[in-house]
Structure formats: structure tokens, C-alpha cells
């Protein structure tokens, strides 16, 4: 894709960047047969149609059609240029990057690039002040009192902003940054009287990084009597609180490893937990969980453990977050935090092992949580409210598919409220039957409305079309087959995209390249062709193709080509007959054309 980058370096990056590992940092992948499957990151879906093949080093989504190799995945998902994808993968693999690669222009706008640079400078400055300056000693003592160790301070690059009005402004202006840029970034504030002051003053600073590890905002925590206690950077194009989760860059590997994530409400909970070796932990950024964040979590894991405070606000937040996560397809558990303690308090009081064993691992199911949460709407000392509560819970339990889980909780209701199991089971059966009938009716209407489109989806491809696809799949897998096909029919395929694809493939092999679909994709500029290559390359290719099989495919393709040529010739004759005012001859030719089309 660039003559200025040594091919040897691109090859080294490709060989050290396994596509399953790279995509696995964005998508929860599960192995099925030879391939890995997960939820597509390019479009919303609840059933996995996104496939990654390790031996061919390519991906393809059977839902939306996106496909390519490890480089194009990052280019599509992150908006990277090829050079940025190459640089990112090289850094990930610990490779030394040539100057002509690291010097390539980024896809960030100049303004965003400057804002990122300003945040990087401040992250280093605030951290240095916390660790080594007299002014920062107060901040260092604060973290020490909260049980945060130096290695954690270093890992998260925690810092301190001096209680001075123009310290940050003067520092960044000396680095060449303009005042207006810094106001836009929320690093300094313009007041109504025209004064400009630092936004964060006299606070310990927590860098907020994106999933690539770049600081894009700060969270400032007051250590005196300042208000508000927590102050975040304002939202910008780079920092949108509803789309980000704190600590995502460090935690995503542990989330995949454990196939679950613990979700907190605060930064300090994450710092304490990560330090205590419970590292699959994230936090929202001072806002309620959003639908976007719920779907992001589902891409990485099946199970989310909500670990919020047990006060009324925390319980409401837990309930709302749980519903969003369940709608996104996650299994939800709720950590059993003691009243009047947050996770940070618990870890400092009892240690990390106790937190993992007695809080995280002892998490209750959503239904267990909900049976307690729902009681707030009823006065259970009143008989009428008790009956309404029981009916409400029966309705909730009727929606659970697991018979064991339903009966487990029904037994709890039966014992606590002295209602026979027979009565509760009968009520469950009635409600499930009503739900089934409603669902059947809805499915019937849905089928009626979509019958035409479903039929279209199930329509089989013509034999010649399948022959071309299968032949190309083998050509991608074996250069000698491509050479034989080139000698026999060249680019005389019947489907236009196939003509373009094989033309590229012949040129690729003539340059001495190996049979490698992932490498071939890099030689194609057109996005649609790249995706189509990935789709065909995903087709299973069994064993070596015999000469007879190749000839059979070629004959099928040729016969369709001859048919197209014969039909084109007949249509020309038909037009001449019509021009000569010979309707009988024109009709006879039309019948010939119809007969030819019916034969295939």
C-alpha cells in the first residue's frame, strides 16, 4: 500500500500480529470448528455472524459483509490509515518502527492531534509533581492514606494539579499550544469576566484514557473542601462519557481471560481493585450506564457483575444498568456489597482476596437481586400488598427459560409467603401459555410480512455462479490452479466482480507472491472487492483439487458464457426482425431466448 515502507517490515508486523489475538481485544471470540465467531463490531446483532479464521488470517461478517485482514480490521474499526494500523500493530508487538512509518500523517485532525499532545504533556507533568514536588506532597499523601501504592500510581500515571490559577496555561503555552485550543479541550476555563484560569486546581488527577491508552480527559478529585468533589473534563469529540469506560485499555485482556467484567461507579474502586489483583474491572464516568456501553461490554464478555453502592441511588442504578445489559444479551450478576461500604472501603478493610471471594465470586443472580429490589414498591405488612408482590414475582419468574431456576425461586416464594408450590406452578404455566400464544401470533405476522424477503434470502445461486465462487476459492488457496485457469479462460468469468477479482489475483501471483488471502487483500484498494475476497476465502476448501474438477468448473463457466453470447446474438437478430417489421420472426427468436434461459 506504500512503496516507502519496506515490505520486510510489513511482513514482520503481519507475522507477529495474529488476527485472532488482535480482534479478540475488540470482540469476544469463541472457537467453533476451525474458525472463531463473535458479535460483529461493525453492526448491531444478537446472534454471532462474525467469523475469524486463524490459518488464513482473515475475518468476514456474514451479516453485514465486512471482511479483510488484520490491517483492514483496524482501518475500518478505528478509522486508521494503513500506516497507523501498521504502527499500532508494530507497537503492540514491541517492534522497532522505521522513521518513514512513524512519520506518516495521522487520521486525527490537527486540532485533535494537538489536544492529545496537550493531554500527554499534562499527564507527565501532573504525575511528576505528585511524585517529586513539594506542592504535590499533599496529593501523594492522599493516595497513600487511601491505600494506593506507588506502583499503582505509576501504572495509572496519577498526578496532582497545583492550586494555582495559571500554572497549566503557562506551561502549555510555553510548549506552543494556543489558549483557544486549551479552552476547547477543557484544560483551562474562561470566566464571565474574561479571566482565564486552569480548570483543575488543588486536585489529585486521574488520567482518563481511551481504549488505545491515550489520555483524552482527566478526572480531578478534591482533597480539601473544594466543590464539586469530583470534576471531569467536559465532553468533546475525543471524550464522550456515554461511550467510554474507565480502565478499558488495561482491563480488556483480563475481561477476555475471565469472560466476565466487574463494573463499578468510581475511579477509586477501580484503582483499589486493580491493585488487589482483581483486574477485570471498569467504571462508568460519573454517569449512568448507557445503551452504547452495554453493547460495548457484550462484545467482550457474556457476564457483567454490577458492583454499585447499596444505598437507594446505587440500587436504582443497578436496576437500570441490569436492564440495559440484559437487553444487550449479557448475563447480569449483582455483587453482594455490605451496606454503607463501597468497594474501595471493603478492599481497604478486608483485602483483595476477601473482596474476590466474598463479593465478586459470591455475586447473586439478577433474579435474586430483583426479588429484594422489587419489595420497595410494596408494604409487605399489608396482605393486599403481599399478594400483589407475589403476583408480580410470578410474572417475572414466568419469563425465565430455565425450569430449575424458576422452581428454585418459586420455592423461596412458597416458603416465605406460605403459598403452595402447586398454586405457584399453575400460575406460571398459565402465564407462559399466554406468552407463547402472543409470541406465536407475533411470529406469524412477522413471517407474513417478511415472507418475500425471506424467500429472496433463501434463493440459491445459479450453478455457474457457484462454480465461479468455488473455483476462485481454490485459486486463492493454490497458485498453480490460478495459473491453469488463467491459461484456460483468463478473466472470462460471467460475474463482473469475479472478473475484477481474478484479474487482481493473476497480477498478484505474477509478482511472485504466495497463496495467502490475507496478504492478497492488502494488494486491493477497493473496499468492496476486499470484503468479497474475505467472503470467498472463508469458503471451506477440501484437499487438493483434481484436474477433472477444475475442468468441470471451467466447462460450467464456459457454457454460461456461450449461453450469454448466444442470447446476445439472438437479441440482435430480434431487433433486426423488429426493424424489418417481421413480428413472426421476432416472436420465434423470443421463444428461442426463453428456452435457452430455462435450460439454466
Image (cartoon, grey):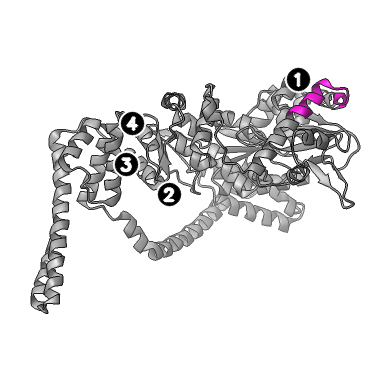
- The CA span between labels 3 and 4 is 13 Å
Q: Is residue 597 left or right of residue 135?
A: left
Among the 4 quarters of the image, the one containing residue 572: bottom left
Characterize the local packing of mark 2: few (<14), some (14-19) or many (20 or more) Cα atoms within 10 angstroms: some
Q: Could you tell me residue 354's position as x and y percent?
A: 70, 24
| First of labels 4, 1 by sequence position | 1
Q: Is residue 368 visible from the viewing direction of this image?
A: yes
Please give the range of residues in magenta.
124-138
Q: List the residue tagged with mark 2.
A: 64
Q: Reply above or below: 358 against 549.
A: above
- The CA span between labels 2 and 4 is 24 Å
Q: Could you tell me residue 262's position as x and y percent?
A: 64, 34
Q: Disc 3 on helix, strand or loop?
A: helix
Q: List the residue tagged with mark 3.
A: 536
Q: Disc 1 on helix, strand or loop?
A: helix
Any mark on residue 516, and which? 4
Q: Disc 2 on helix, strand or loop?
A: loop
Amino acid at each position: 500500500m506504500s512503496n516507502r515502507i519496506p515490505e520486510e517490515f510489513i511482513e514482520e508486523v503481519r507475522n507477529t500480529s495474529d488476527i485472532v489475538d488482535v480482534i479478540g481485544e475488540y470482540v469476544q471470540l469463541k472457537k467453533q470448528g476451525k474458525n472463531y465467531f463473535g458479535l460483529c463490531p461493525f453492526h448491531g446483532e444478537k446472534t454471532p455472524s462474525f467469523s475469524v479464521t486463524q490459518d488464513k488470517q482473515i475475518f468476514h461478517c456474514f451479516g453485514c459483509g465486512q471482511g479483510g485482514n488484520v490491517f483492514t480490521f483496524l482501518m475500518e474499526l478505528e478509522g486508521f490509515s494503513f500506516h497507523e494500523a501498521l504502527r499500532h500493530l508494530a507497537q503492540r508487538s514491541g517492534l522497532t518502527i522505521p522513521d518513514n512509518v512513524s512519520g506518516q500523517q495521522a487520521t486525527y485532525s490537527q486540532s485533535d492531534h494537538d489536544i492529545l499532545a496537550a493531554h500527554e504533556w499534562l499527564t507527565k507533568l501532573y504525575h511528576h509533581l505528585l511524585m517529586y514536588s513539594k506542592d504535590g506532597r499533599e496529593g501523594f499523601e492522599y493516595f497513600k492514606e487511601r491505600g494506593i501504592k506507588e506502583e499503582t500510581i505509576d501504572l495509572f500515571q496519577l498526578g496532582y494539579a497545583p492550586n494555582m490559577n495559571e500554572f497549566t496555561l503557562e506551561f502549555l503555552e510555553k510548549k506552543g499550544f494556543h489558549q483557544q485550543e486549551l479552552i476547547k479541550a477543557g484544560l483551562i476555563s474562561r470566566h464571565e469576566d474574561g479571566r482565564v484560569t486552569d480548570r483543575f486546581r488543588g486536585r489529585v488527577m486521574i488520567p482518563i484514557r481511551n481504549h488505545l491508552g491515550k489520555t483524552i480527559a482527566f478526572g480531578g478529585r478534591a482533597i480539601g473542601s473544594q466543590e464539586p468533589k469530583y470534576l471531569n473534563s467536559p465532553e468533546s469529540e475525543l471524550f464522550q462519557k456515554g461511550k467510554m469506560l474507565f480502565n478499558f485499555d488495561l482491563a480488556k485482556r483480563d475481561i477476555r481471560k475471565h469472560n466476565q467484567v466487574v463494573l463499578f461507579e468510581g475511579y477509586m474502586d477501580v484503582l483499589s481493585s486493580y491493585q488487589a489483583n482483581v483486574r477485570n474491572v471498569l467504571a462508568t464516568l460519573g454517569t449512568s450506564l448507557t445503551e452504547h456501553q452495554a453493547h460495548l461490554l457484550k462484545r467482550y464478555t457474556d457476564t457483567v457483575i454490577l458492583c454499585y453502592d447499596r444505598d437507594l441511588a446505587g440500587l436504582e442504578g443497578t436496576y437500570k444498568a441490569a436492564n440495559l445489559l440484559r437487553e444487550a444479551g449479557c448475563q447480569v450478576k449483582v455483587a453482594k456489597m455490605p451496606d454503607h461500604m463501597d468497594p474501595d472501603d471493603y478492599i481497604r478493610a478486608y483485602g483483595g482476596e476477601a473482596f474476590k471471594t466474598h463479593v465478586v465470586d459470591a455475586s447473586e443472580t439478577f433474579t435474586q437481586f430483583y426479588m429484594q429490589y422489587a419489595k420497595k414498591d410494596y408494604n409487605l405488612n399489608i396482605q393486599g400488598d403481599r399478594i400483589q408482590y407475589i403476583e408480580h414475582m410470578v410474572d417475572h419468574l414466568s419469563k425465565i427459560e430455565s425450569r430449575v431456576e424458576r422452581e428454585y425461586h418459586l420455592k423461596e416464594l412458597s416458603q416465605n409467603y406460605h403459598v403452595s408450590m402447586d398454586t405457584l406452578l399453575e400460575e406460571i404455566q398459565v402465564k407462559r401459555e399466554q406468552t407463547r400464544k402472543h409470541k406465536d401470533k407475533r411470529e406469524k405476522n412477522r413471517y407474513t410480512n417478511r415472507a418475500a424477503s425471506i424467500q429472496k434470502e433463501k434463493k440459491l445461486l445459479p450453478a455457474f455462479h457457484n462454480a465461479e465462487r468455488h473455483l476462485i476459492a481454490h485459486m486463492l488457496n493454490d497458485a498453480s490452479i490460478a495459473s491453469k485457469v488463467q491459461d484456460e479462460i483468463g478473466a472470462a468469468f460471467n460475474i463482473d466482480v469475479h472478473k475484477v477479482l481474478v484479474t487482481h489475483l493473476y497480477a498478484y501471483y505474477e509478482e511472485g507472491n504466495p497463496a495467502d488471502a490475507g496478504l492478497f487483500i492488502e494488494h486491493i484498494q477497493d473496499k468492496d472487492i476486499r470484503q468479497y475476497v474475505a467472503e470467498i476465502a472463508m469458503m471451506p476448501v477440501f484437499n487438493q483439487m483434481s484436474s477433472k474438477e477444475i475442468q468441470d468448473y471451467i466447462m460450467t463457466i464456459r457454457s454460461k458464457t456461450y449461453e450469454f453470447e448466444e442470447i446476445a446474438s439472438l437479441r440482435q437478430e430480434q431487433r433486426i426482425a423488429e426493424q424489418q417489421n417481421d413480428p413472426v420472426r421476432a416472436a420465434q427468436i423470443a421463444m428461442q431466448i426463453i428456452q435457452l434461459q430455462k435450460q439454466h
